[in-house]
Every structure is written in C-alpha cells, then in structure tokens.
Image (spheres, helix red, strand yellow):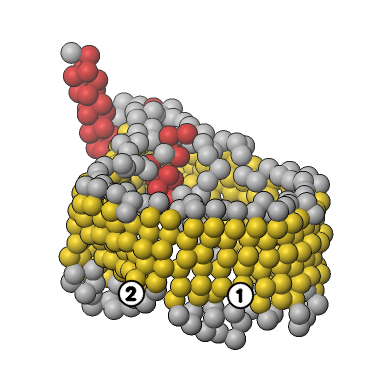
Amino acid sequence: MPRTALLSLLSAAFLCALYLSPAQGGDFGIWPLFSYYSSEGEKEVEIFGPLFTWGTDEHGTEWGVRPFLYLTTYPSQELWRWEFLYPLGKYQVKEGDGKAYLVPFTLFRDEKTSSAPERRERAYSILTAFWGQTDEGERYGGFFPVAGRLKERFGRDEIQFYLWPLYSRIEDEGEITWRTPWPLFSRFGGAAEGLYIWPLWGRRERAGEYKKGFMLWPCYVYMDEDLDTDNPVSKRYYLPFYATVRSPQGRVDMFLPPLFFHQWAYHSSFEKWEFPWPFVTLVKGEGVREWQVFPLFRLRTEEHKKRSYFLWPLYKYEWDLTSTKEEVVRRFLLINRYRTVKELETGREAVDANLWPLFDYRRGLEGEVRFFMFPLFPLHDEGMERNIYPLGWVYRYTRSPEGETLSDFLWGLYRRRTSSEFSSTRFAFFLRINKHGDERFSLSLFEGLFRYQRAPKGGEVGLFFMGPSD
C-alpha cells in the first residue's frame, strides 16, 4: 500500500506539473521527486534526482535508470547503444558496426574491416565457447580448453588446440608451431625449423631472417634478428651477469641486468647510461639530453618534446609540439593534472584541469565548459559520465559552444539555466523565476501556489494553481 500511494502521488504531481508547464519552454519540478525542462528542440525529465533520466534534442534521445540501464539513440550518427550495469555490459550499433559484451559471460563483435569496408569480421563468445568468421568468410569456433580453431585472432593466422595445454598448433606468416604440451615441447615447421625442450635447450631458425635459441633458459639466450636488412641485430643474454645487443648502428651492454646499462651509437653522438636502473639515468646526443635521479628529479629535452618530474609522483611535466598544436600537461600525484592544448594556426586553447576529489574542469576548443565539484573518480570516461558520475554530483556547471549554461546543486535543489533569449532560476519547488528576453517575466512560488507574470500587455497574478501560465 505505501508503494502504491507513493506512485499515485508522484503520478498526480507529475501530471499536475505538466498541466502547469510553461507554454514557451522553461524549468519546473518538485525537488527531489522530479524535474522537467523544455526549450526549443530540447526536453529533459529527471525523476528521483539522477536515478531516472530522459532527454531529447536535435541529435536524438537518451534515457536511463542509473546505474542499471542507459539507452542512447542518435539517428544522425547512426548510433544505437544500450549500457547495463556499466562498465560490465554494453550493446552498441554504430554506422552498421555492432559490438556487445557482458563481463565475464559473453562478447560479440560484427564490424567492417578497415582494409576492405565491403567485408565484415564477426566474433562471438559465451564463457569459454567461441565462434566467428573472418573478413574472407572463413568460419571458426571451439570450446576452450577442450578443442577449437581460431582464425586471425591474437595476432596469428590460425590457432588450433585440443585439451590445451596438451596440444596446440599455431600458424603465422608461413611458420607452423606444434606445442605438446605448452610450454615444455615445441616443434617448428613450414618456413621455420627448430625444436624447444624448455627450459633445457631450444633452437629456432628462419633462413635468411632470424636465428633464436636458449640453453638452461633464462641463463643463456641468443637471438639474431633482421638478418635480411642492412641493420641485423645480435642479442646475447648470460643471466644474471651480463647481456649485450649489437648491430652496425651501435651496441648495448648490461651488467647484472637490468641494473647497469650502457648504450651508444657508432655513427652519432647518442649515449645512454643507467647506474643503477631505475635510479640514475644520463642521456646525451644530438637533439636530446636527460638527467634523472629517481625519485628526486628528471629533466629530458628533445627538439619537440620535454619531460620532467620533481619528487615523483608529486609533480610531473610534459610538453609536446607538433606542426598543428602545442600540448602542456602538469600532473600532481599522477591523478591530478592541468592540461592545455593550443591550436597554433587559430590560437584557440582547450583546458583540462582536475584536483581530485575537489573538482574537475574542462574547456573545449569551441568554448564549451564542464565543471564538477567533488567528482567520484579522477577519470574521464563517457560511459561513466552517463551511468555512474551523475549519482555523485554535488555541483555542476556546463556551457555549450552557443553560450547556453546550466548551474545545478544537488540534482535541482538549486538550478539555473541561461541562453541568449531565456533564463530560468529554481530553488527546489519553493521558487521559480523565468525570463524570456526583456519582455516576459514570471515568478512562481510552490510551483503555482502563487504566480506572477509580466508581459508587454501588463502584469497578472494567479493563486492556487489558477491564473497566468508561463
């Protein structure tokens, strides 16, 4: 009975408010039960603060029941997206590409390939069962670890397995690897040949391209790579005492790796020392200098890049310059930052600043602004901003590129909206003031218990929800 009475009261109040809604757009509600806002081409409804939300504008429609469900439909962007228990679940279709997941149970992907947009790749999984299709129409599937075959997944052309790790077969770039079982015994064929008996001994070779092997891994490991190029690389590891990397361009020596490191180039002035890693680093060369004594300080300068820190992780500085923009990032305790991005041609500047947990501020290149006090997390994630962050909003301020602003405290306890032709100020359901340009003004107490309206034709007063409408 109490639940039925509450729903009836809420429905009656909402219908009454709709009847009394501003005829030319405005902002009204009964805080904290619900809030309604409308303007030209835009409507927004909130019920029980941030828990239920619905809105529509020129882009499309959004509605959600936070933190359980959120739907976004933007026809102009060919976007249809469901988010449920975010970030655990999501289903999205955008420009014909579909993907979905529900951690840790299922994954779905159906997308056009970047190299051939007329082709599509499909991949599905439910727990450890999987199936899919490559962009050339080849099907695959299986049930891990019992048996299965994958095509063009995990960076390999094909992977087959039976009772993994007892047996697996991997094919990639003409090479075939049999593992029975992984990682103890591996045999190589196809374009390569060799055998691994891990960790005792192993050898793998592809004629004219590379040679690799080990003995009593990781005590002795050798790798000769890029043999078909002008810069073949030879690597030898005698762990834990010494390791070296040599090529026609230079060499690297490591003593008690990775503690003591020395690198130098034969044909340039580049040289790098670490003694011991990661505490002391010295780098010198054409266009680059670095001095580091971790965690006290670091100074690294390059032609278009600078990196430094002081008492890491207390303060960190980054500077990057490209042909089109200049970016500066200052970090405090890693999670707090002040970041600016400046367009060199136009002089426009974007700012991203936060001091968690006190505030988060963003200003875009178009002049749009987003400001939040006491944010839940120091992360910028669109899904979190739709599903989770509104639940912890204390105060927020937003401004669109067109100059429309919103100031909100405690989901509508105080709310003010402004635009070029309209402004609305509301204190819960006690007071609401709307202005349409310089000619129309309205004041409402208790959402209509007392109303006053001023228009070019004169002023009017209404009592007990009767009288002039906005």
Q: Secondary structure at mark 2?
A: strand
Look at the picture and state if 106 lies above or below 222.
above
Residue at horizontal 34 percent and vertical 57 percent from the top: 179
Residue 198, position as x, y percentages in the image:
45, 53
Q: Secondary structure at mark 1?
A: strand
Q: Quadrant of the N terminus?
A: top left
Left of 194 or right of it: where is 93?
left
Left of 45 or right of it: where is 122?
left
Residue at horizontal 19 percent and vertical 62 percent from the top: 140
Q: Which residue is mark 2?
A: 190
Q: Which residue is mark 1?
A: 233
Residue 222, position as x, y percentages in the image:
57, 65
Check residue 122 in the rendering and tell me which mark sits there, or answer none: none
Near mark 2 (Cα within 10 A), the count class, few <14, some 14-19 or many ≥20, is few
Residue 452, position as x, y percentages in the image:
41, 36
- Which of the 4 image quarters holds residue 374? top right
Residue 268, position as x, y percentages in the image:
77, 80
Q: Foreground mark, 1 or 2?
A: 2
Count of numbered badges drawn on the protein: 2
Q: Disc 2 residue type?
A: Gly
Left of 364 or right of it: where is 23?
left
- Which of the 4 image quarters holds residue 30? top left
